[in-house]
Image (spheres, rainbow, N blue to C red):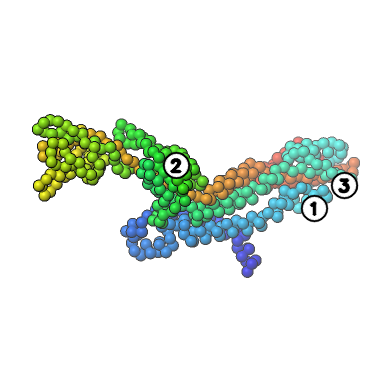
Amino acid sequence: MIKKLHKLFSSVRLTIFLFLFLAATSILGTIIQQGLPMERYKVLYGSGVFSVLKFFNIFDMYHSWWFTTLLILLSINIIVCTFKQIPRIIRLISPEKKEIDDTIFNSSQIRKTFQSQKKLSDIERQSELLIQSLVGNPVKTVKDDVIYFFAEKGKYSRLGMIFVHISILLILAGGLIGTMLGFVGQMNIVEGEKSNTVTLFGGKGTEKLGVDVRCDDFTVEFYKTGMPKEYKTDLTILDNKRKIASGTMRVNHPFIYKGLKFCQATYGIAGVSDLLVGVRNNKTGEETVLKPNIMKKISLPGSNASFAIARFVNDHGGNGPAVLGVLIEPGKAQHDIFWIFQNEQNINQQQKSGFVFTLKDFSRLYYTGIQVSKDPGVSLVWIGFCLIMMGFMLSLFFTHKRIWLRISGSQDKYEFSIAASVSKNRKTFEEKLEGLTRETTVE
C-alpha cells in the first residue's frame, strides 16, 4: 500500500490532473459570484440546483472542504515529487569525483570520437580551446599516459526546479493559513468615536480586533459636479485607552498595523451638528436665528408656539439638504410637520403660522467605512514569490553543461574522445560542438 501511494503521489499525471481540476473549479468560482445572501442564490438557481450547490459549498468555494483537500493533495504530490528528484540533483551538483571513470565516454548522451596524427601538444592546446569555447576553463588530469580534461558550468541551475516546487508549497501554505486564520470585513466609525468589532463579509458574523480603532478626523473634497474627489481618515489604535499607533488612510493607500490592513472603502453622513434655522416673523419682518438640536423643543420668539427638528436628510427630492420641522402650537391637536430647505427654496411650504423657516447652515458629521483584513499567510506568499522568481531565472536563463575529453594513443595516432551532457538545448549544443571540432581540424 505504501509503495502504491508513493507511486500515485510521485506521478506527474496526478499533478496535471490536480492543476486542471483546480483551474476548472476556479473558473466556476469566478462565474458564480461568491458571498451573496442565500436568499439571492435561491432566486437565481431555484431550489433543486441551489441544494446541490450549497452541499458542495460553491457559494464560498475557496473556503470549502473539498477545495482545501485539493490544495493539500497537490502539496503532498509536489513534496513527494521533489524528494524523489533531490538525490539526483545532489549527485549532479556535487563536486566531480577525482577518480577517472571511462564509462562516461560510452554512456553519455553526447559522444564523439576522432583520430589525429598531430603532435600531442597541438592536440592538448586545441582540446583546451574547444572546451573553453563550449563550457569554460578545463581541469587536466593524467592517468596511465592518458590525458583527461573536464569542465562544468551552471550546475546550480539544477536547483531551479527545487526552488519552484518549494515556492509553490509556500504559496499554497500561505493561502491555506490566510483562509483558515484570516478574515475580511468592514467597520463603520463615526468621527470621534471608536470600535473594535469587524462585521465579516458573507454573513459570517463578527470579529474582535483586540484593540480599539478610533476615527480622529474624516475629510472629503468634492469636484464642482458634487462627486467626491478625495476622502481620507485619520486613525488611532488604542490598547486599554493608551495610544499605540496612528496614521492616515486614503483610497488605495491603506494603513497597516501588526498584520491588520485598514483600507478606505466608503463613507457616509451619520448626522449633523451646529444646525442654524432662520425664523422670520411675517408681521414684524424680524428674523431670528435658532440653534436647535434634533428632537429638542425650542420656543419661537414672539409666540407661544414651539419648534423642533425631527431629522435631517442630505438631499430631499433633488432640492438639496433639508430638515424636517415640527411646529407645536397650544390648543392644536395636530402638529404641523414640514420640510425646511436652504436658501428659501419651496417658500410656500415653509410658511407656517405667520413664520417663514429657512435652513441657514449646518455641519455634517461623517462616518468612515473601513475594510479590515488580516492575512497571516501573506509573508509566506511573498517568500514563495521571491523563490519562484529565482527558480524561473535559474531554470530559464542558465544551463548545466558538462564536458569530458580524453586523449589516448601513441605518437603515430592519437584517439580524441569527447563526452558531454547539457540540461537543455541539446541540439544547439551539439551543433556548436560539431562546428568547433571541425574548426580545430582534428582528424
Q: Secondary structure at mark 2?
A: strand
- Left or right of 383? Residue 146 is right
Residue at the location (46% across, 40% down)? 246
User: Which residue in the structure is indicated by mark 3?
Assistant: 143
Question: Which is more N-terminal, label 2 or label 3?
Answer: 3
Q: Is residue 261 visible?
A: no
269 up-or-down from 104: above or below: above
Q: Position of residue 132 (x, y in %)?
A: 76, 37
- Gap between marks 3 and 2 measured at Cα: 77 Å
User: Which of the 4 quarters of the picture holds residue 231?
Assistant: top left
Residue at the location (56% across, 49% down)? 380
How packed mark 1 is, by other alpha carbons closer than 10 Å (few <14, some 14-19, many 20 or more), is few
Q: Position of residue 158 (x, y in %)?
A: 67, 48
Answer yes or no: do the residues labelled 1 and 3 have beta carbons within 8 Å? Answer: no
Kind of residue at badge 1: Thr
Residue at the location (33% across, 42% down)? 268
Say which mark, if any, is on residue 103: 1
Q: Secondary structure at mark 3?
A: strand
User: Which residue in the structure is indicated by mark 2?
Assistant: 236
Q: Quadrant of the N terminus?
A: bottom right
Kind of residue at badge 3: Lys
Kind of residue at badge 2: Thr
Q: Position of residue 19 (x, y in %)?
A: 53, 55
Question: Which is more N-terminal, label 3 or label 1?
Answer: 1
Near-viewer residue (309 or 5): 309
Mark nearer the viewer, 3 or 2: 2
User: Which of the 4 quarters of the picture holds residue 270?
Assistant: top left
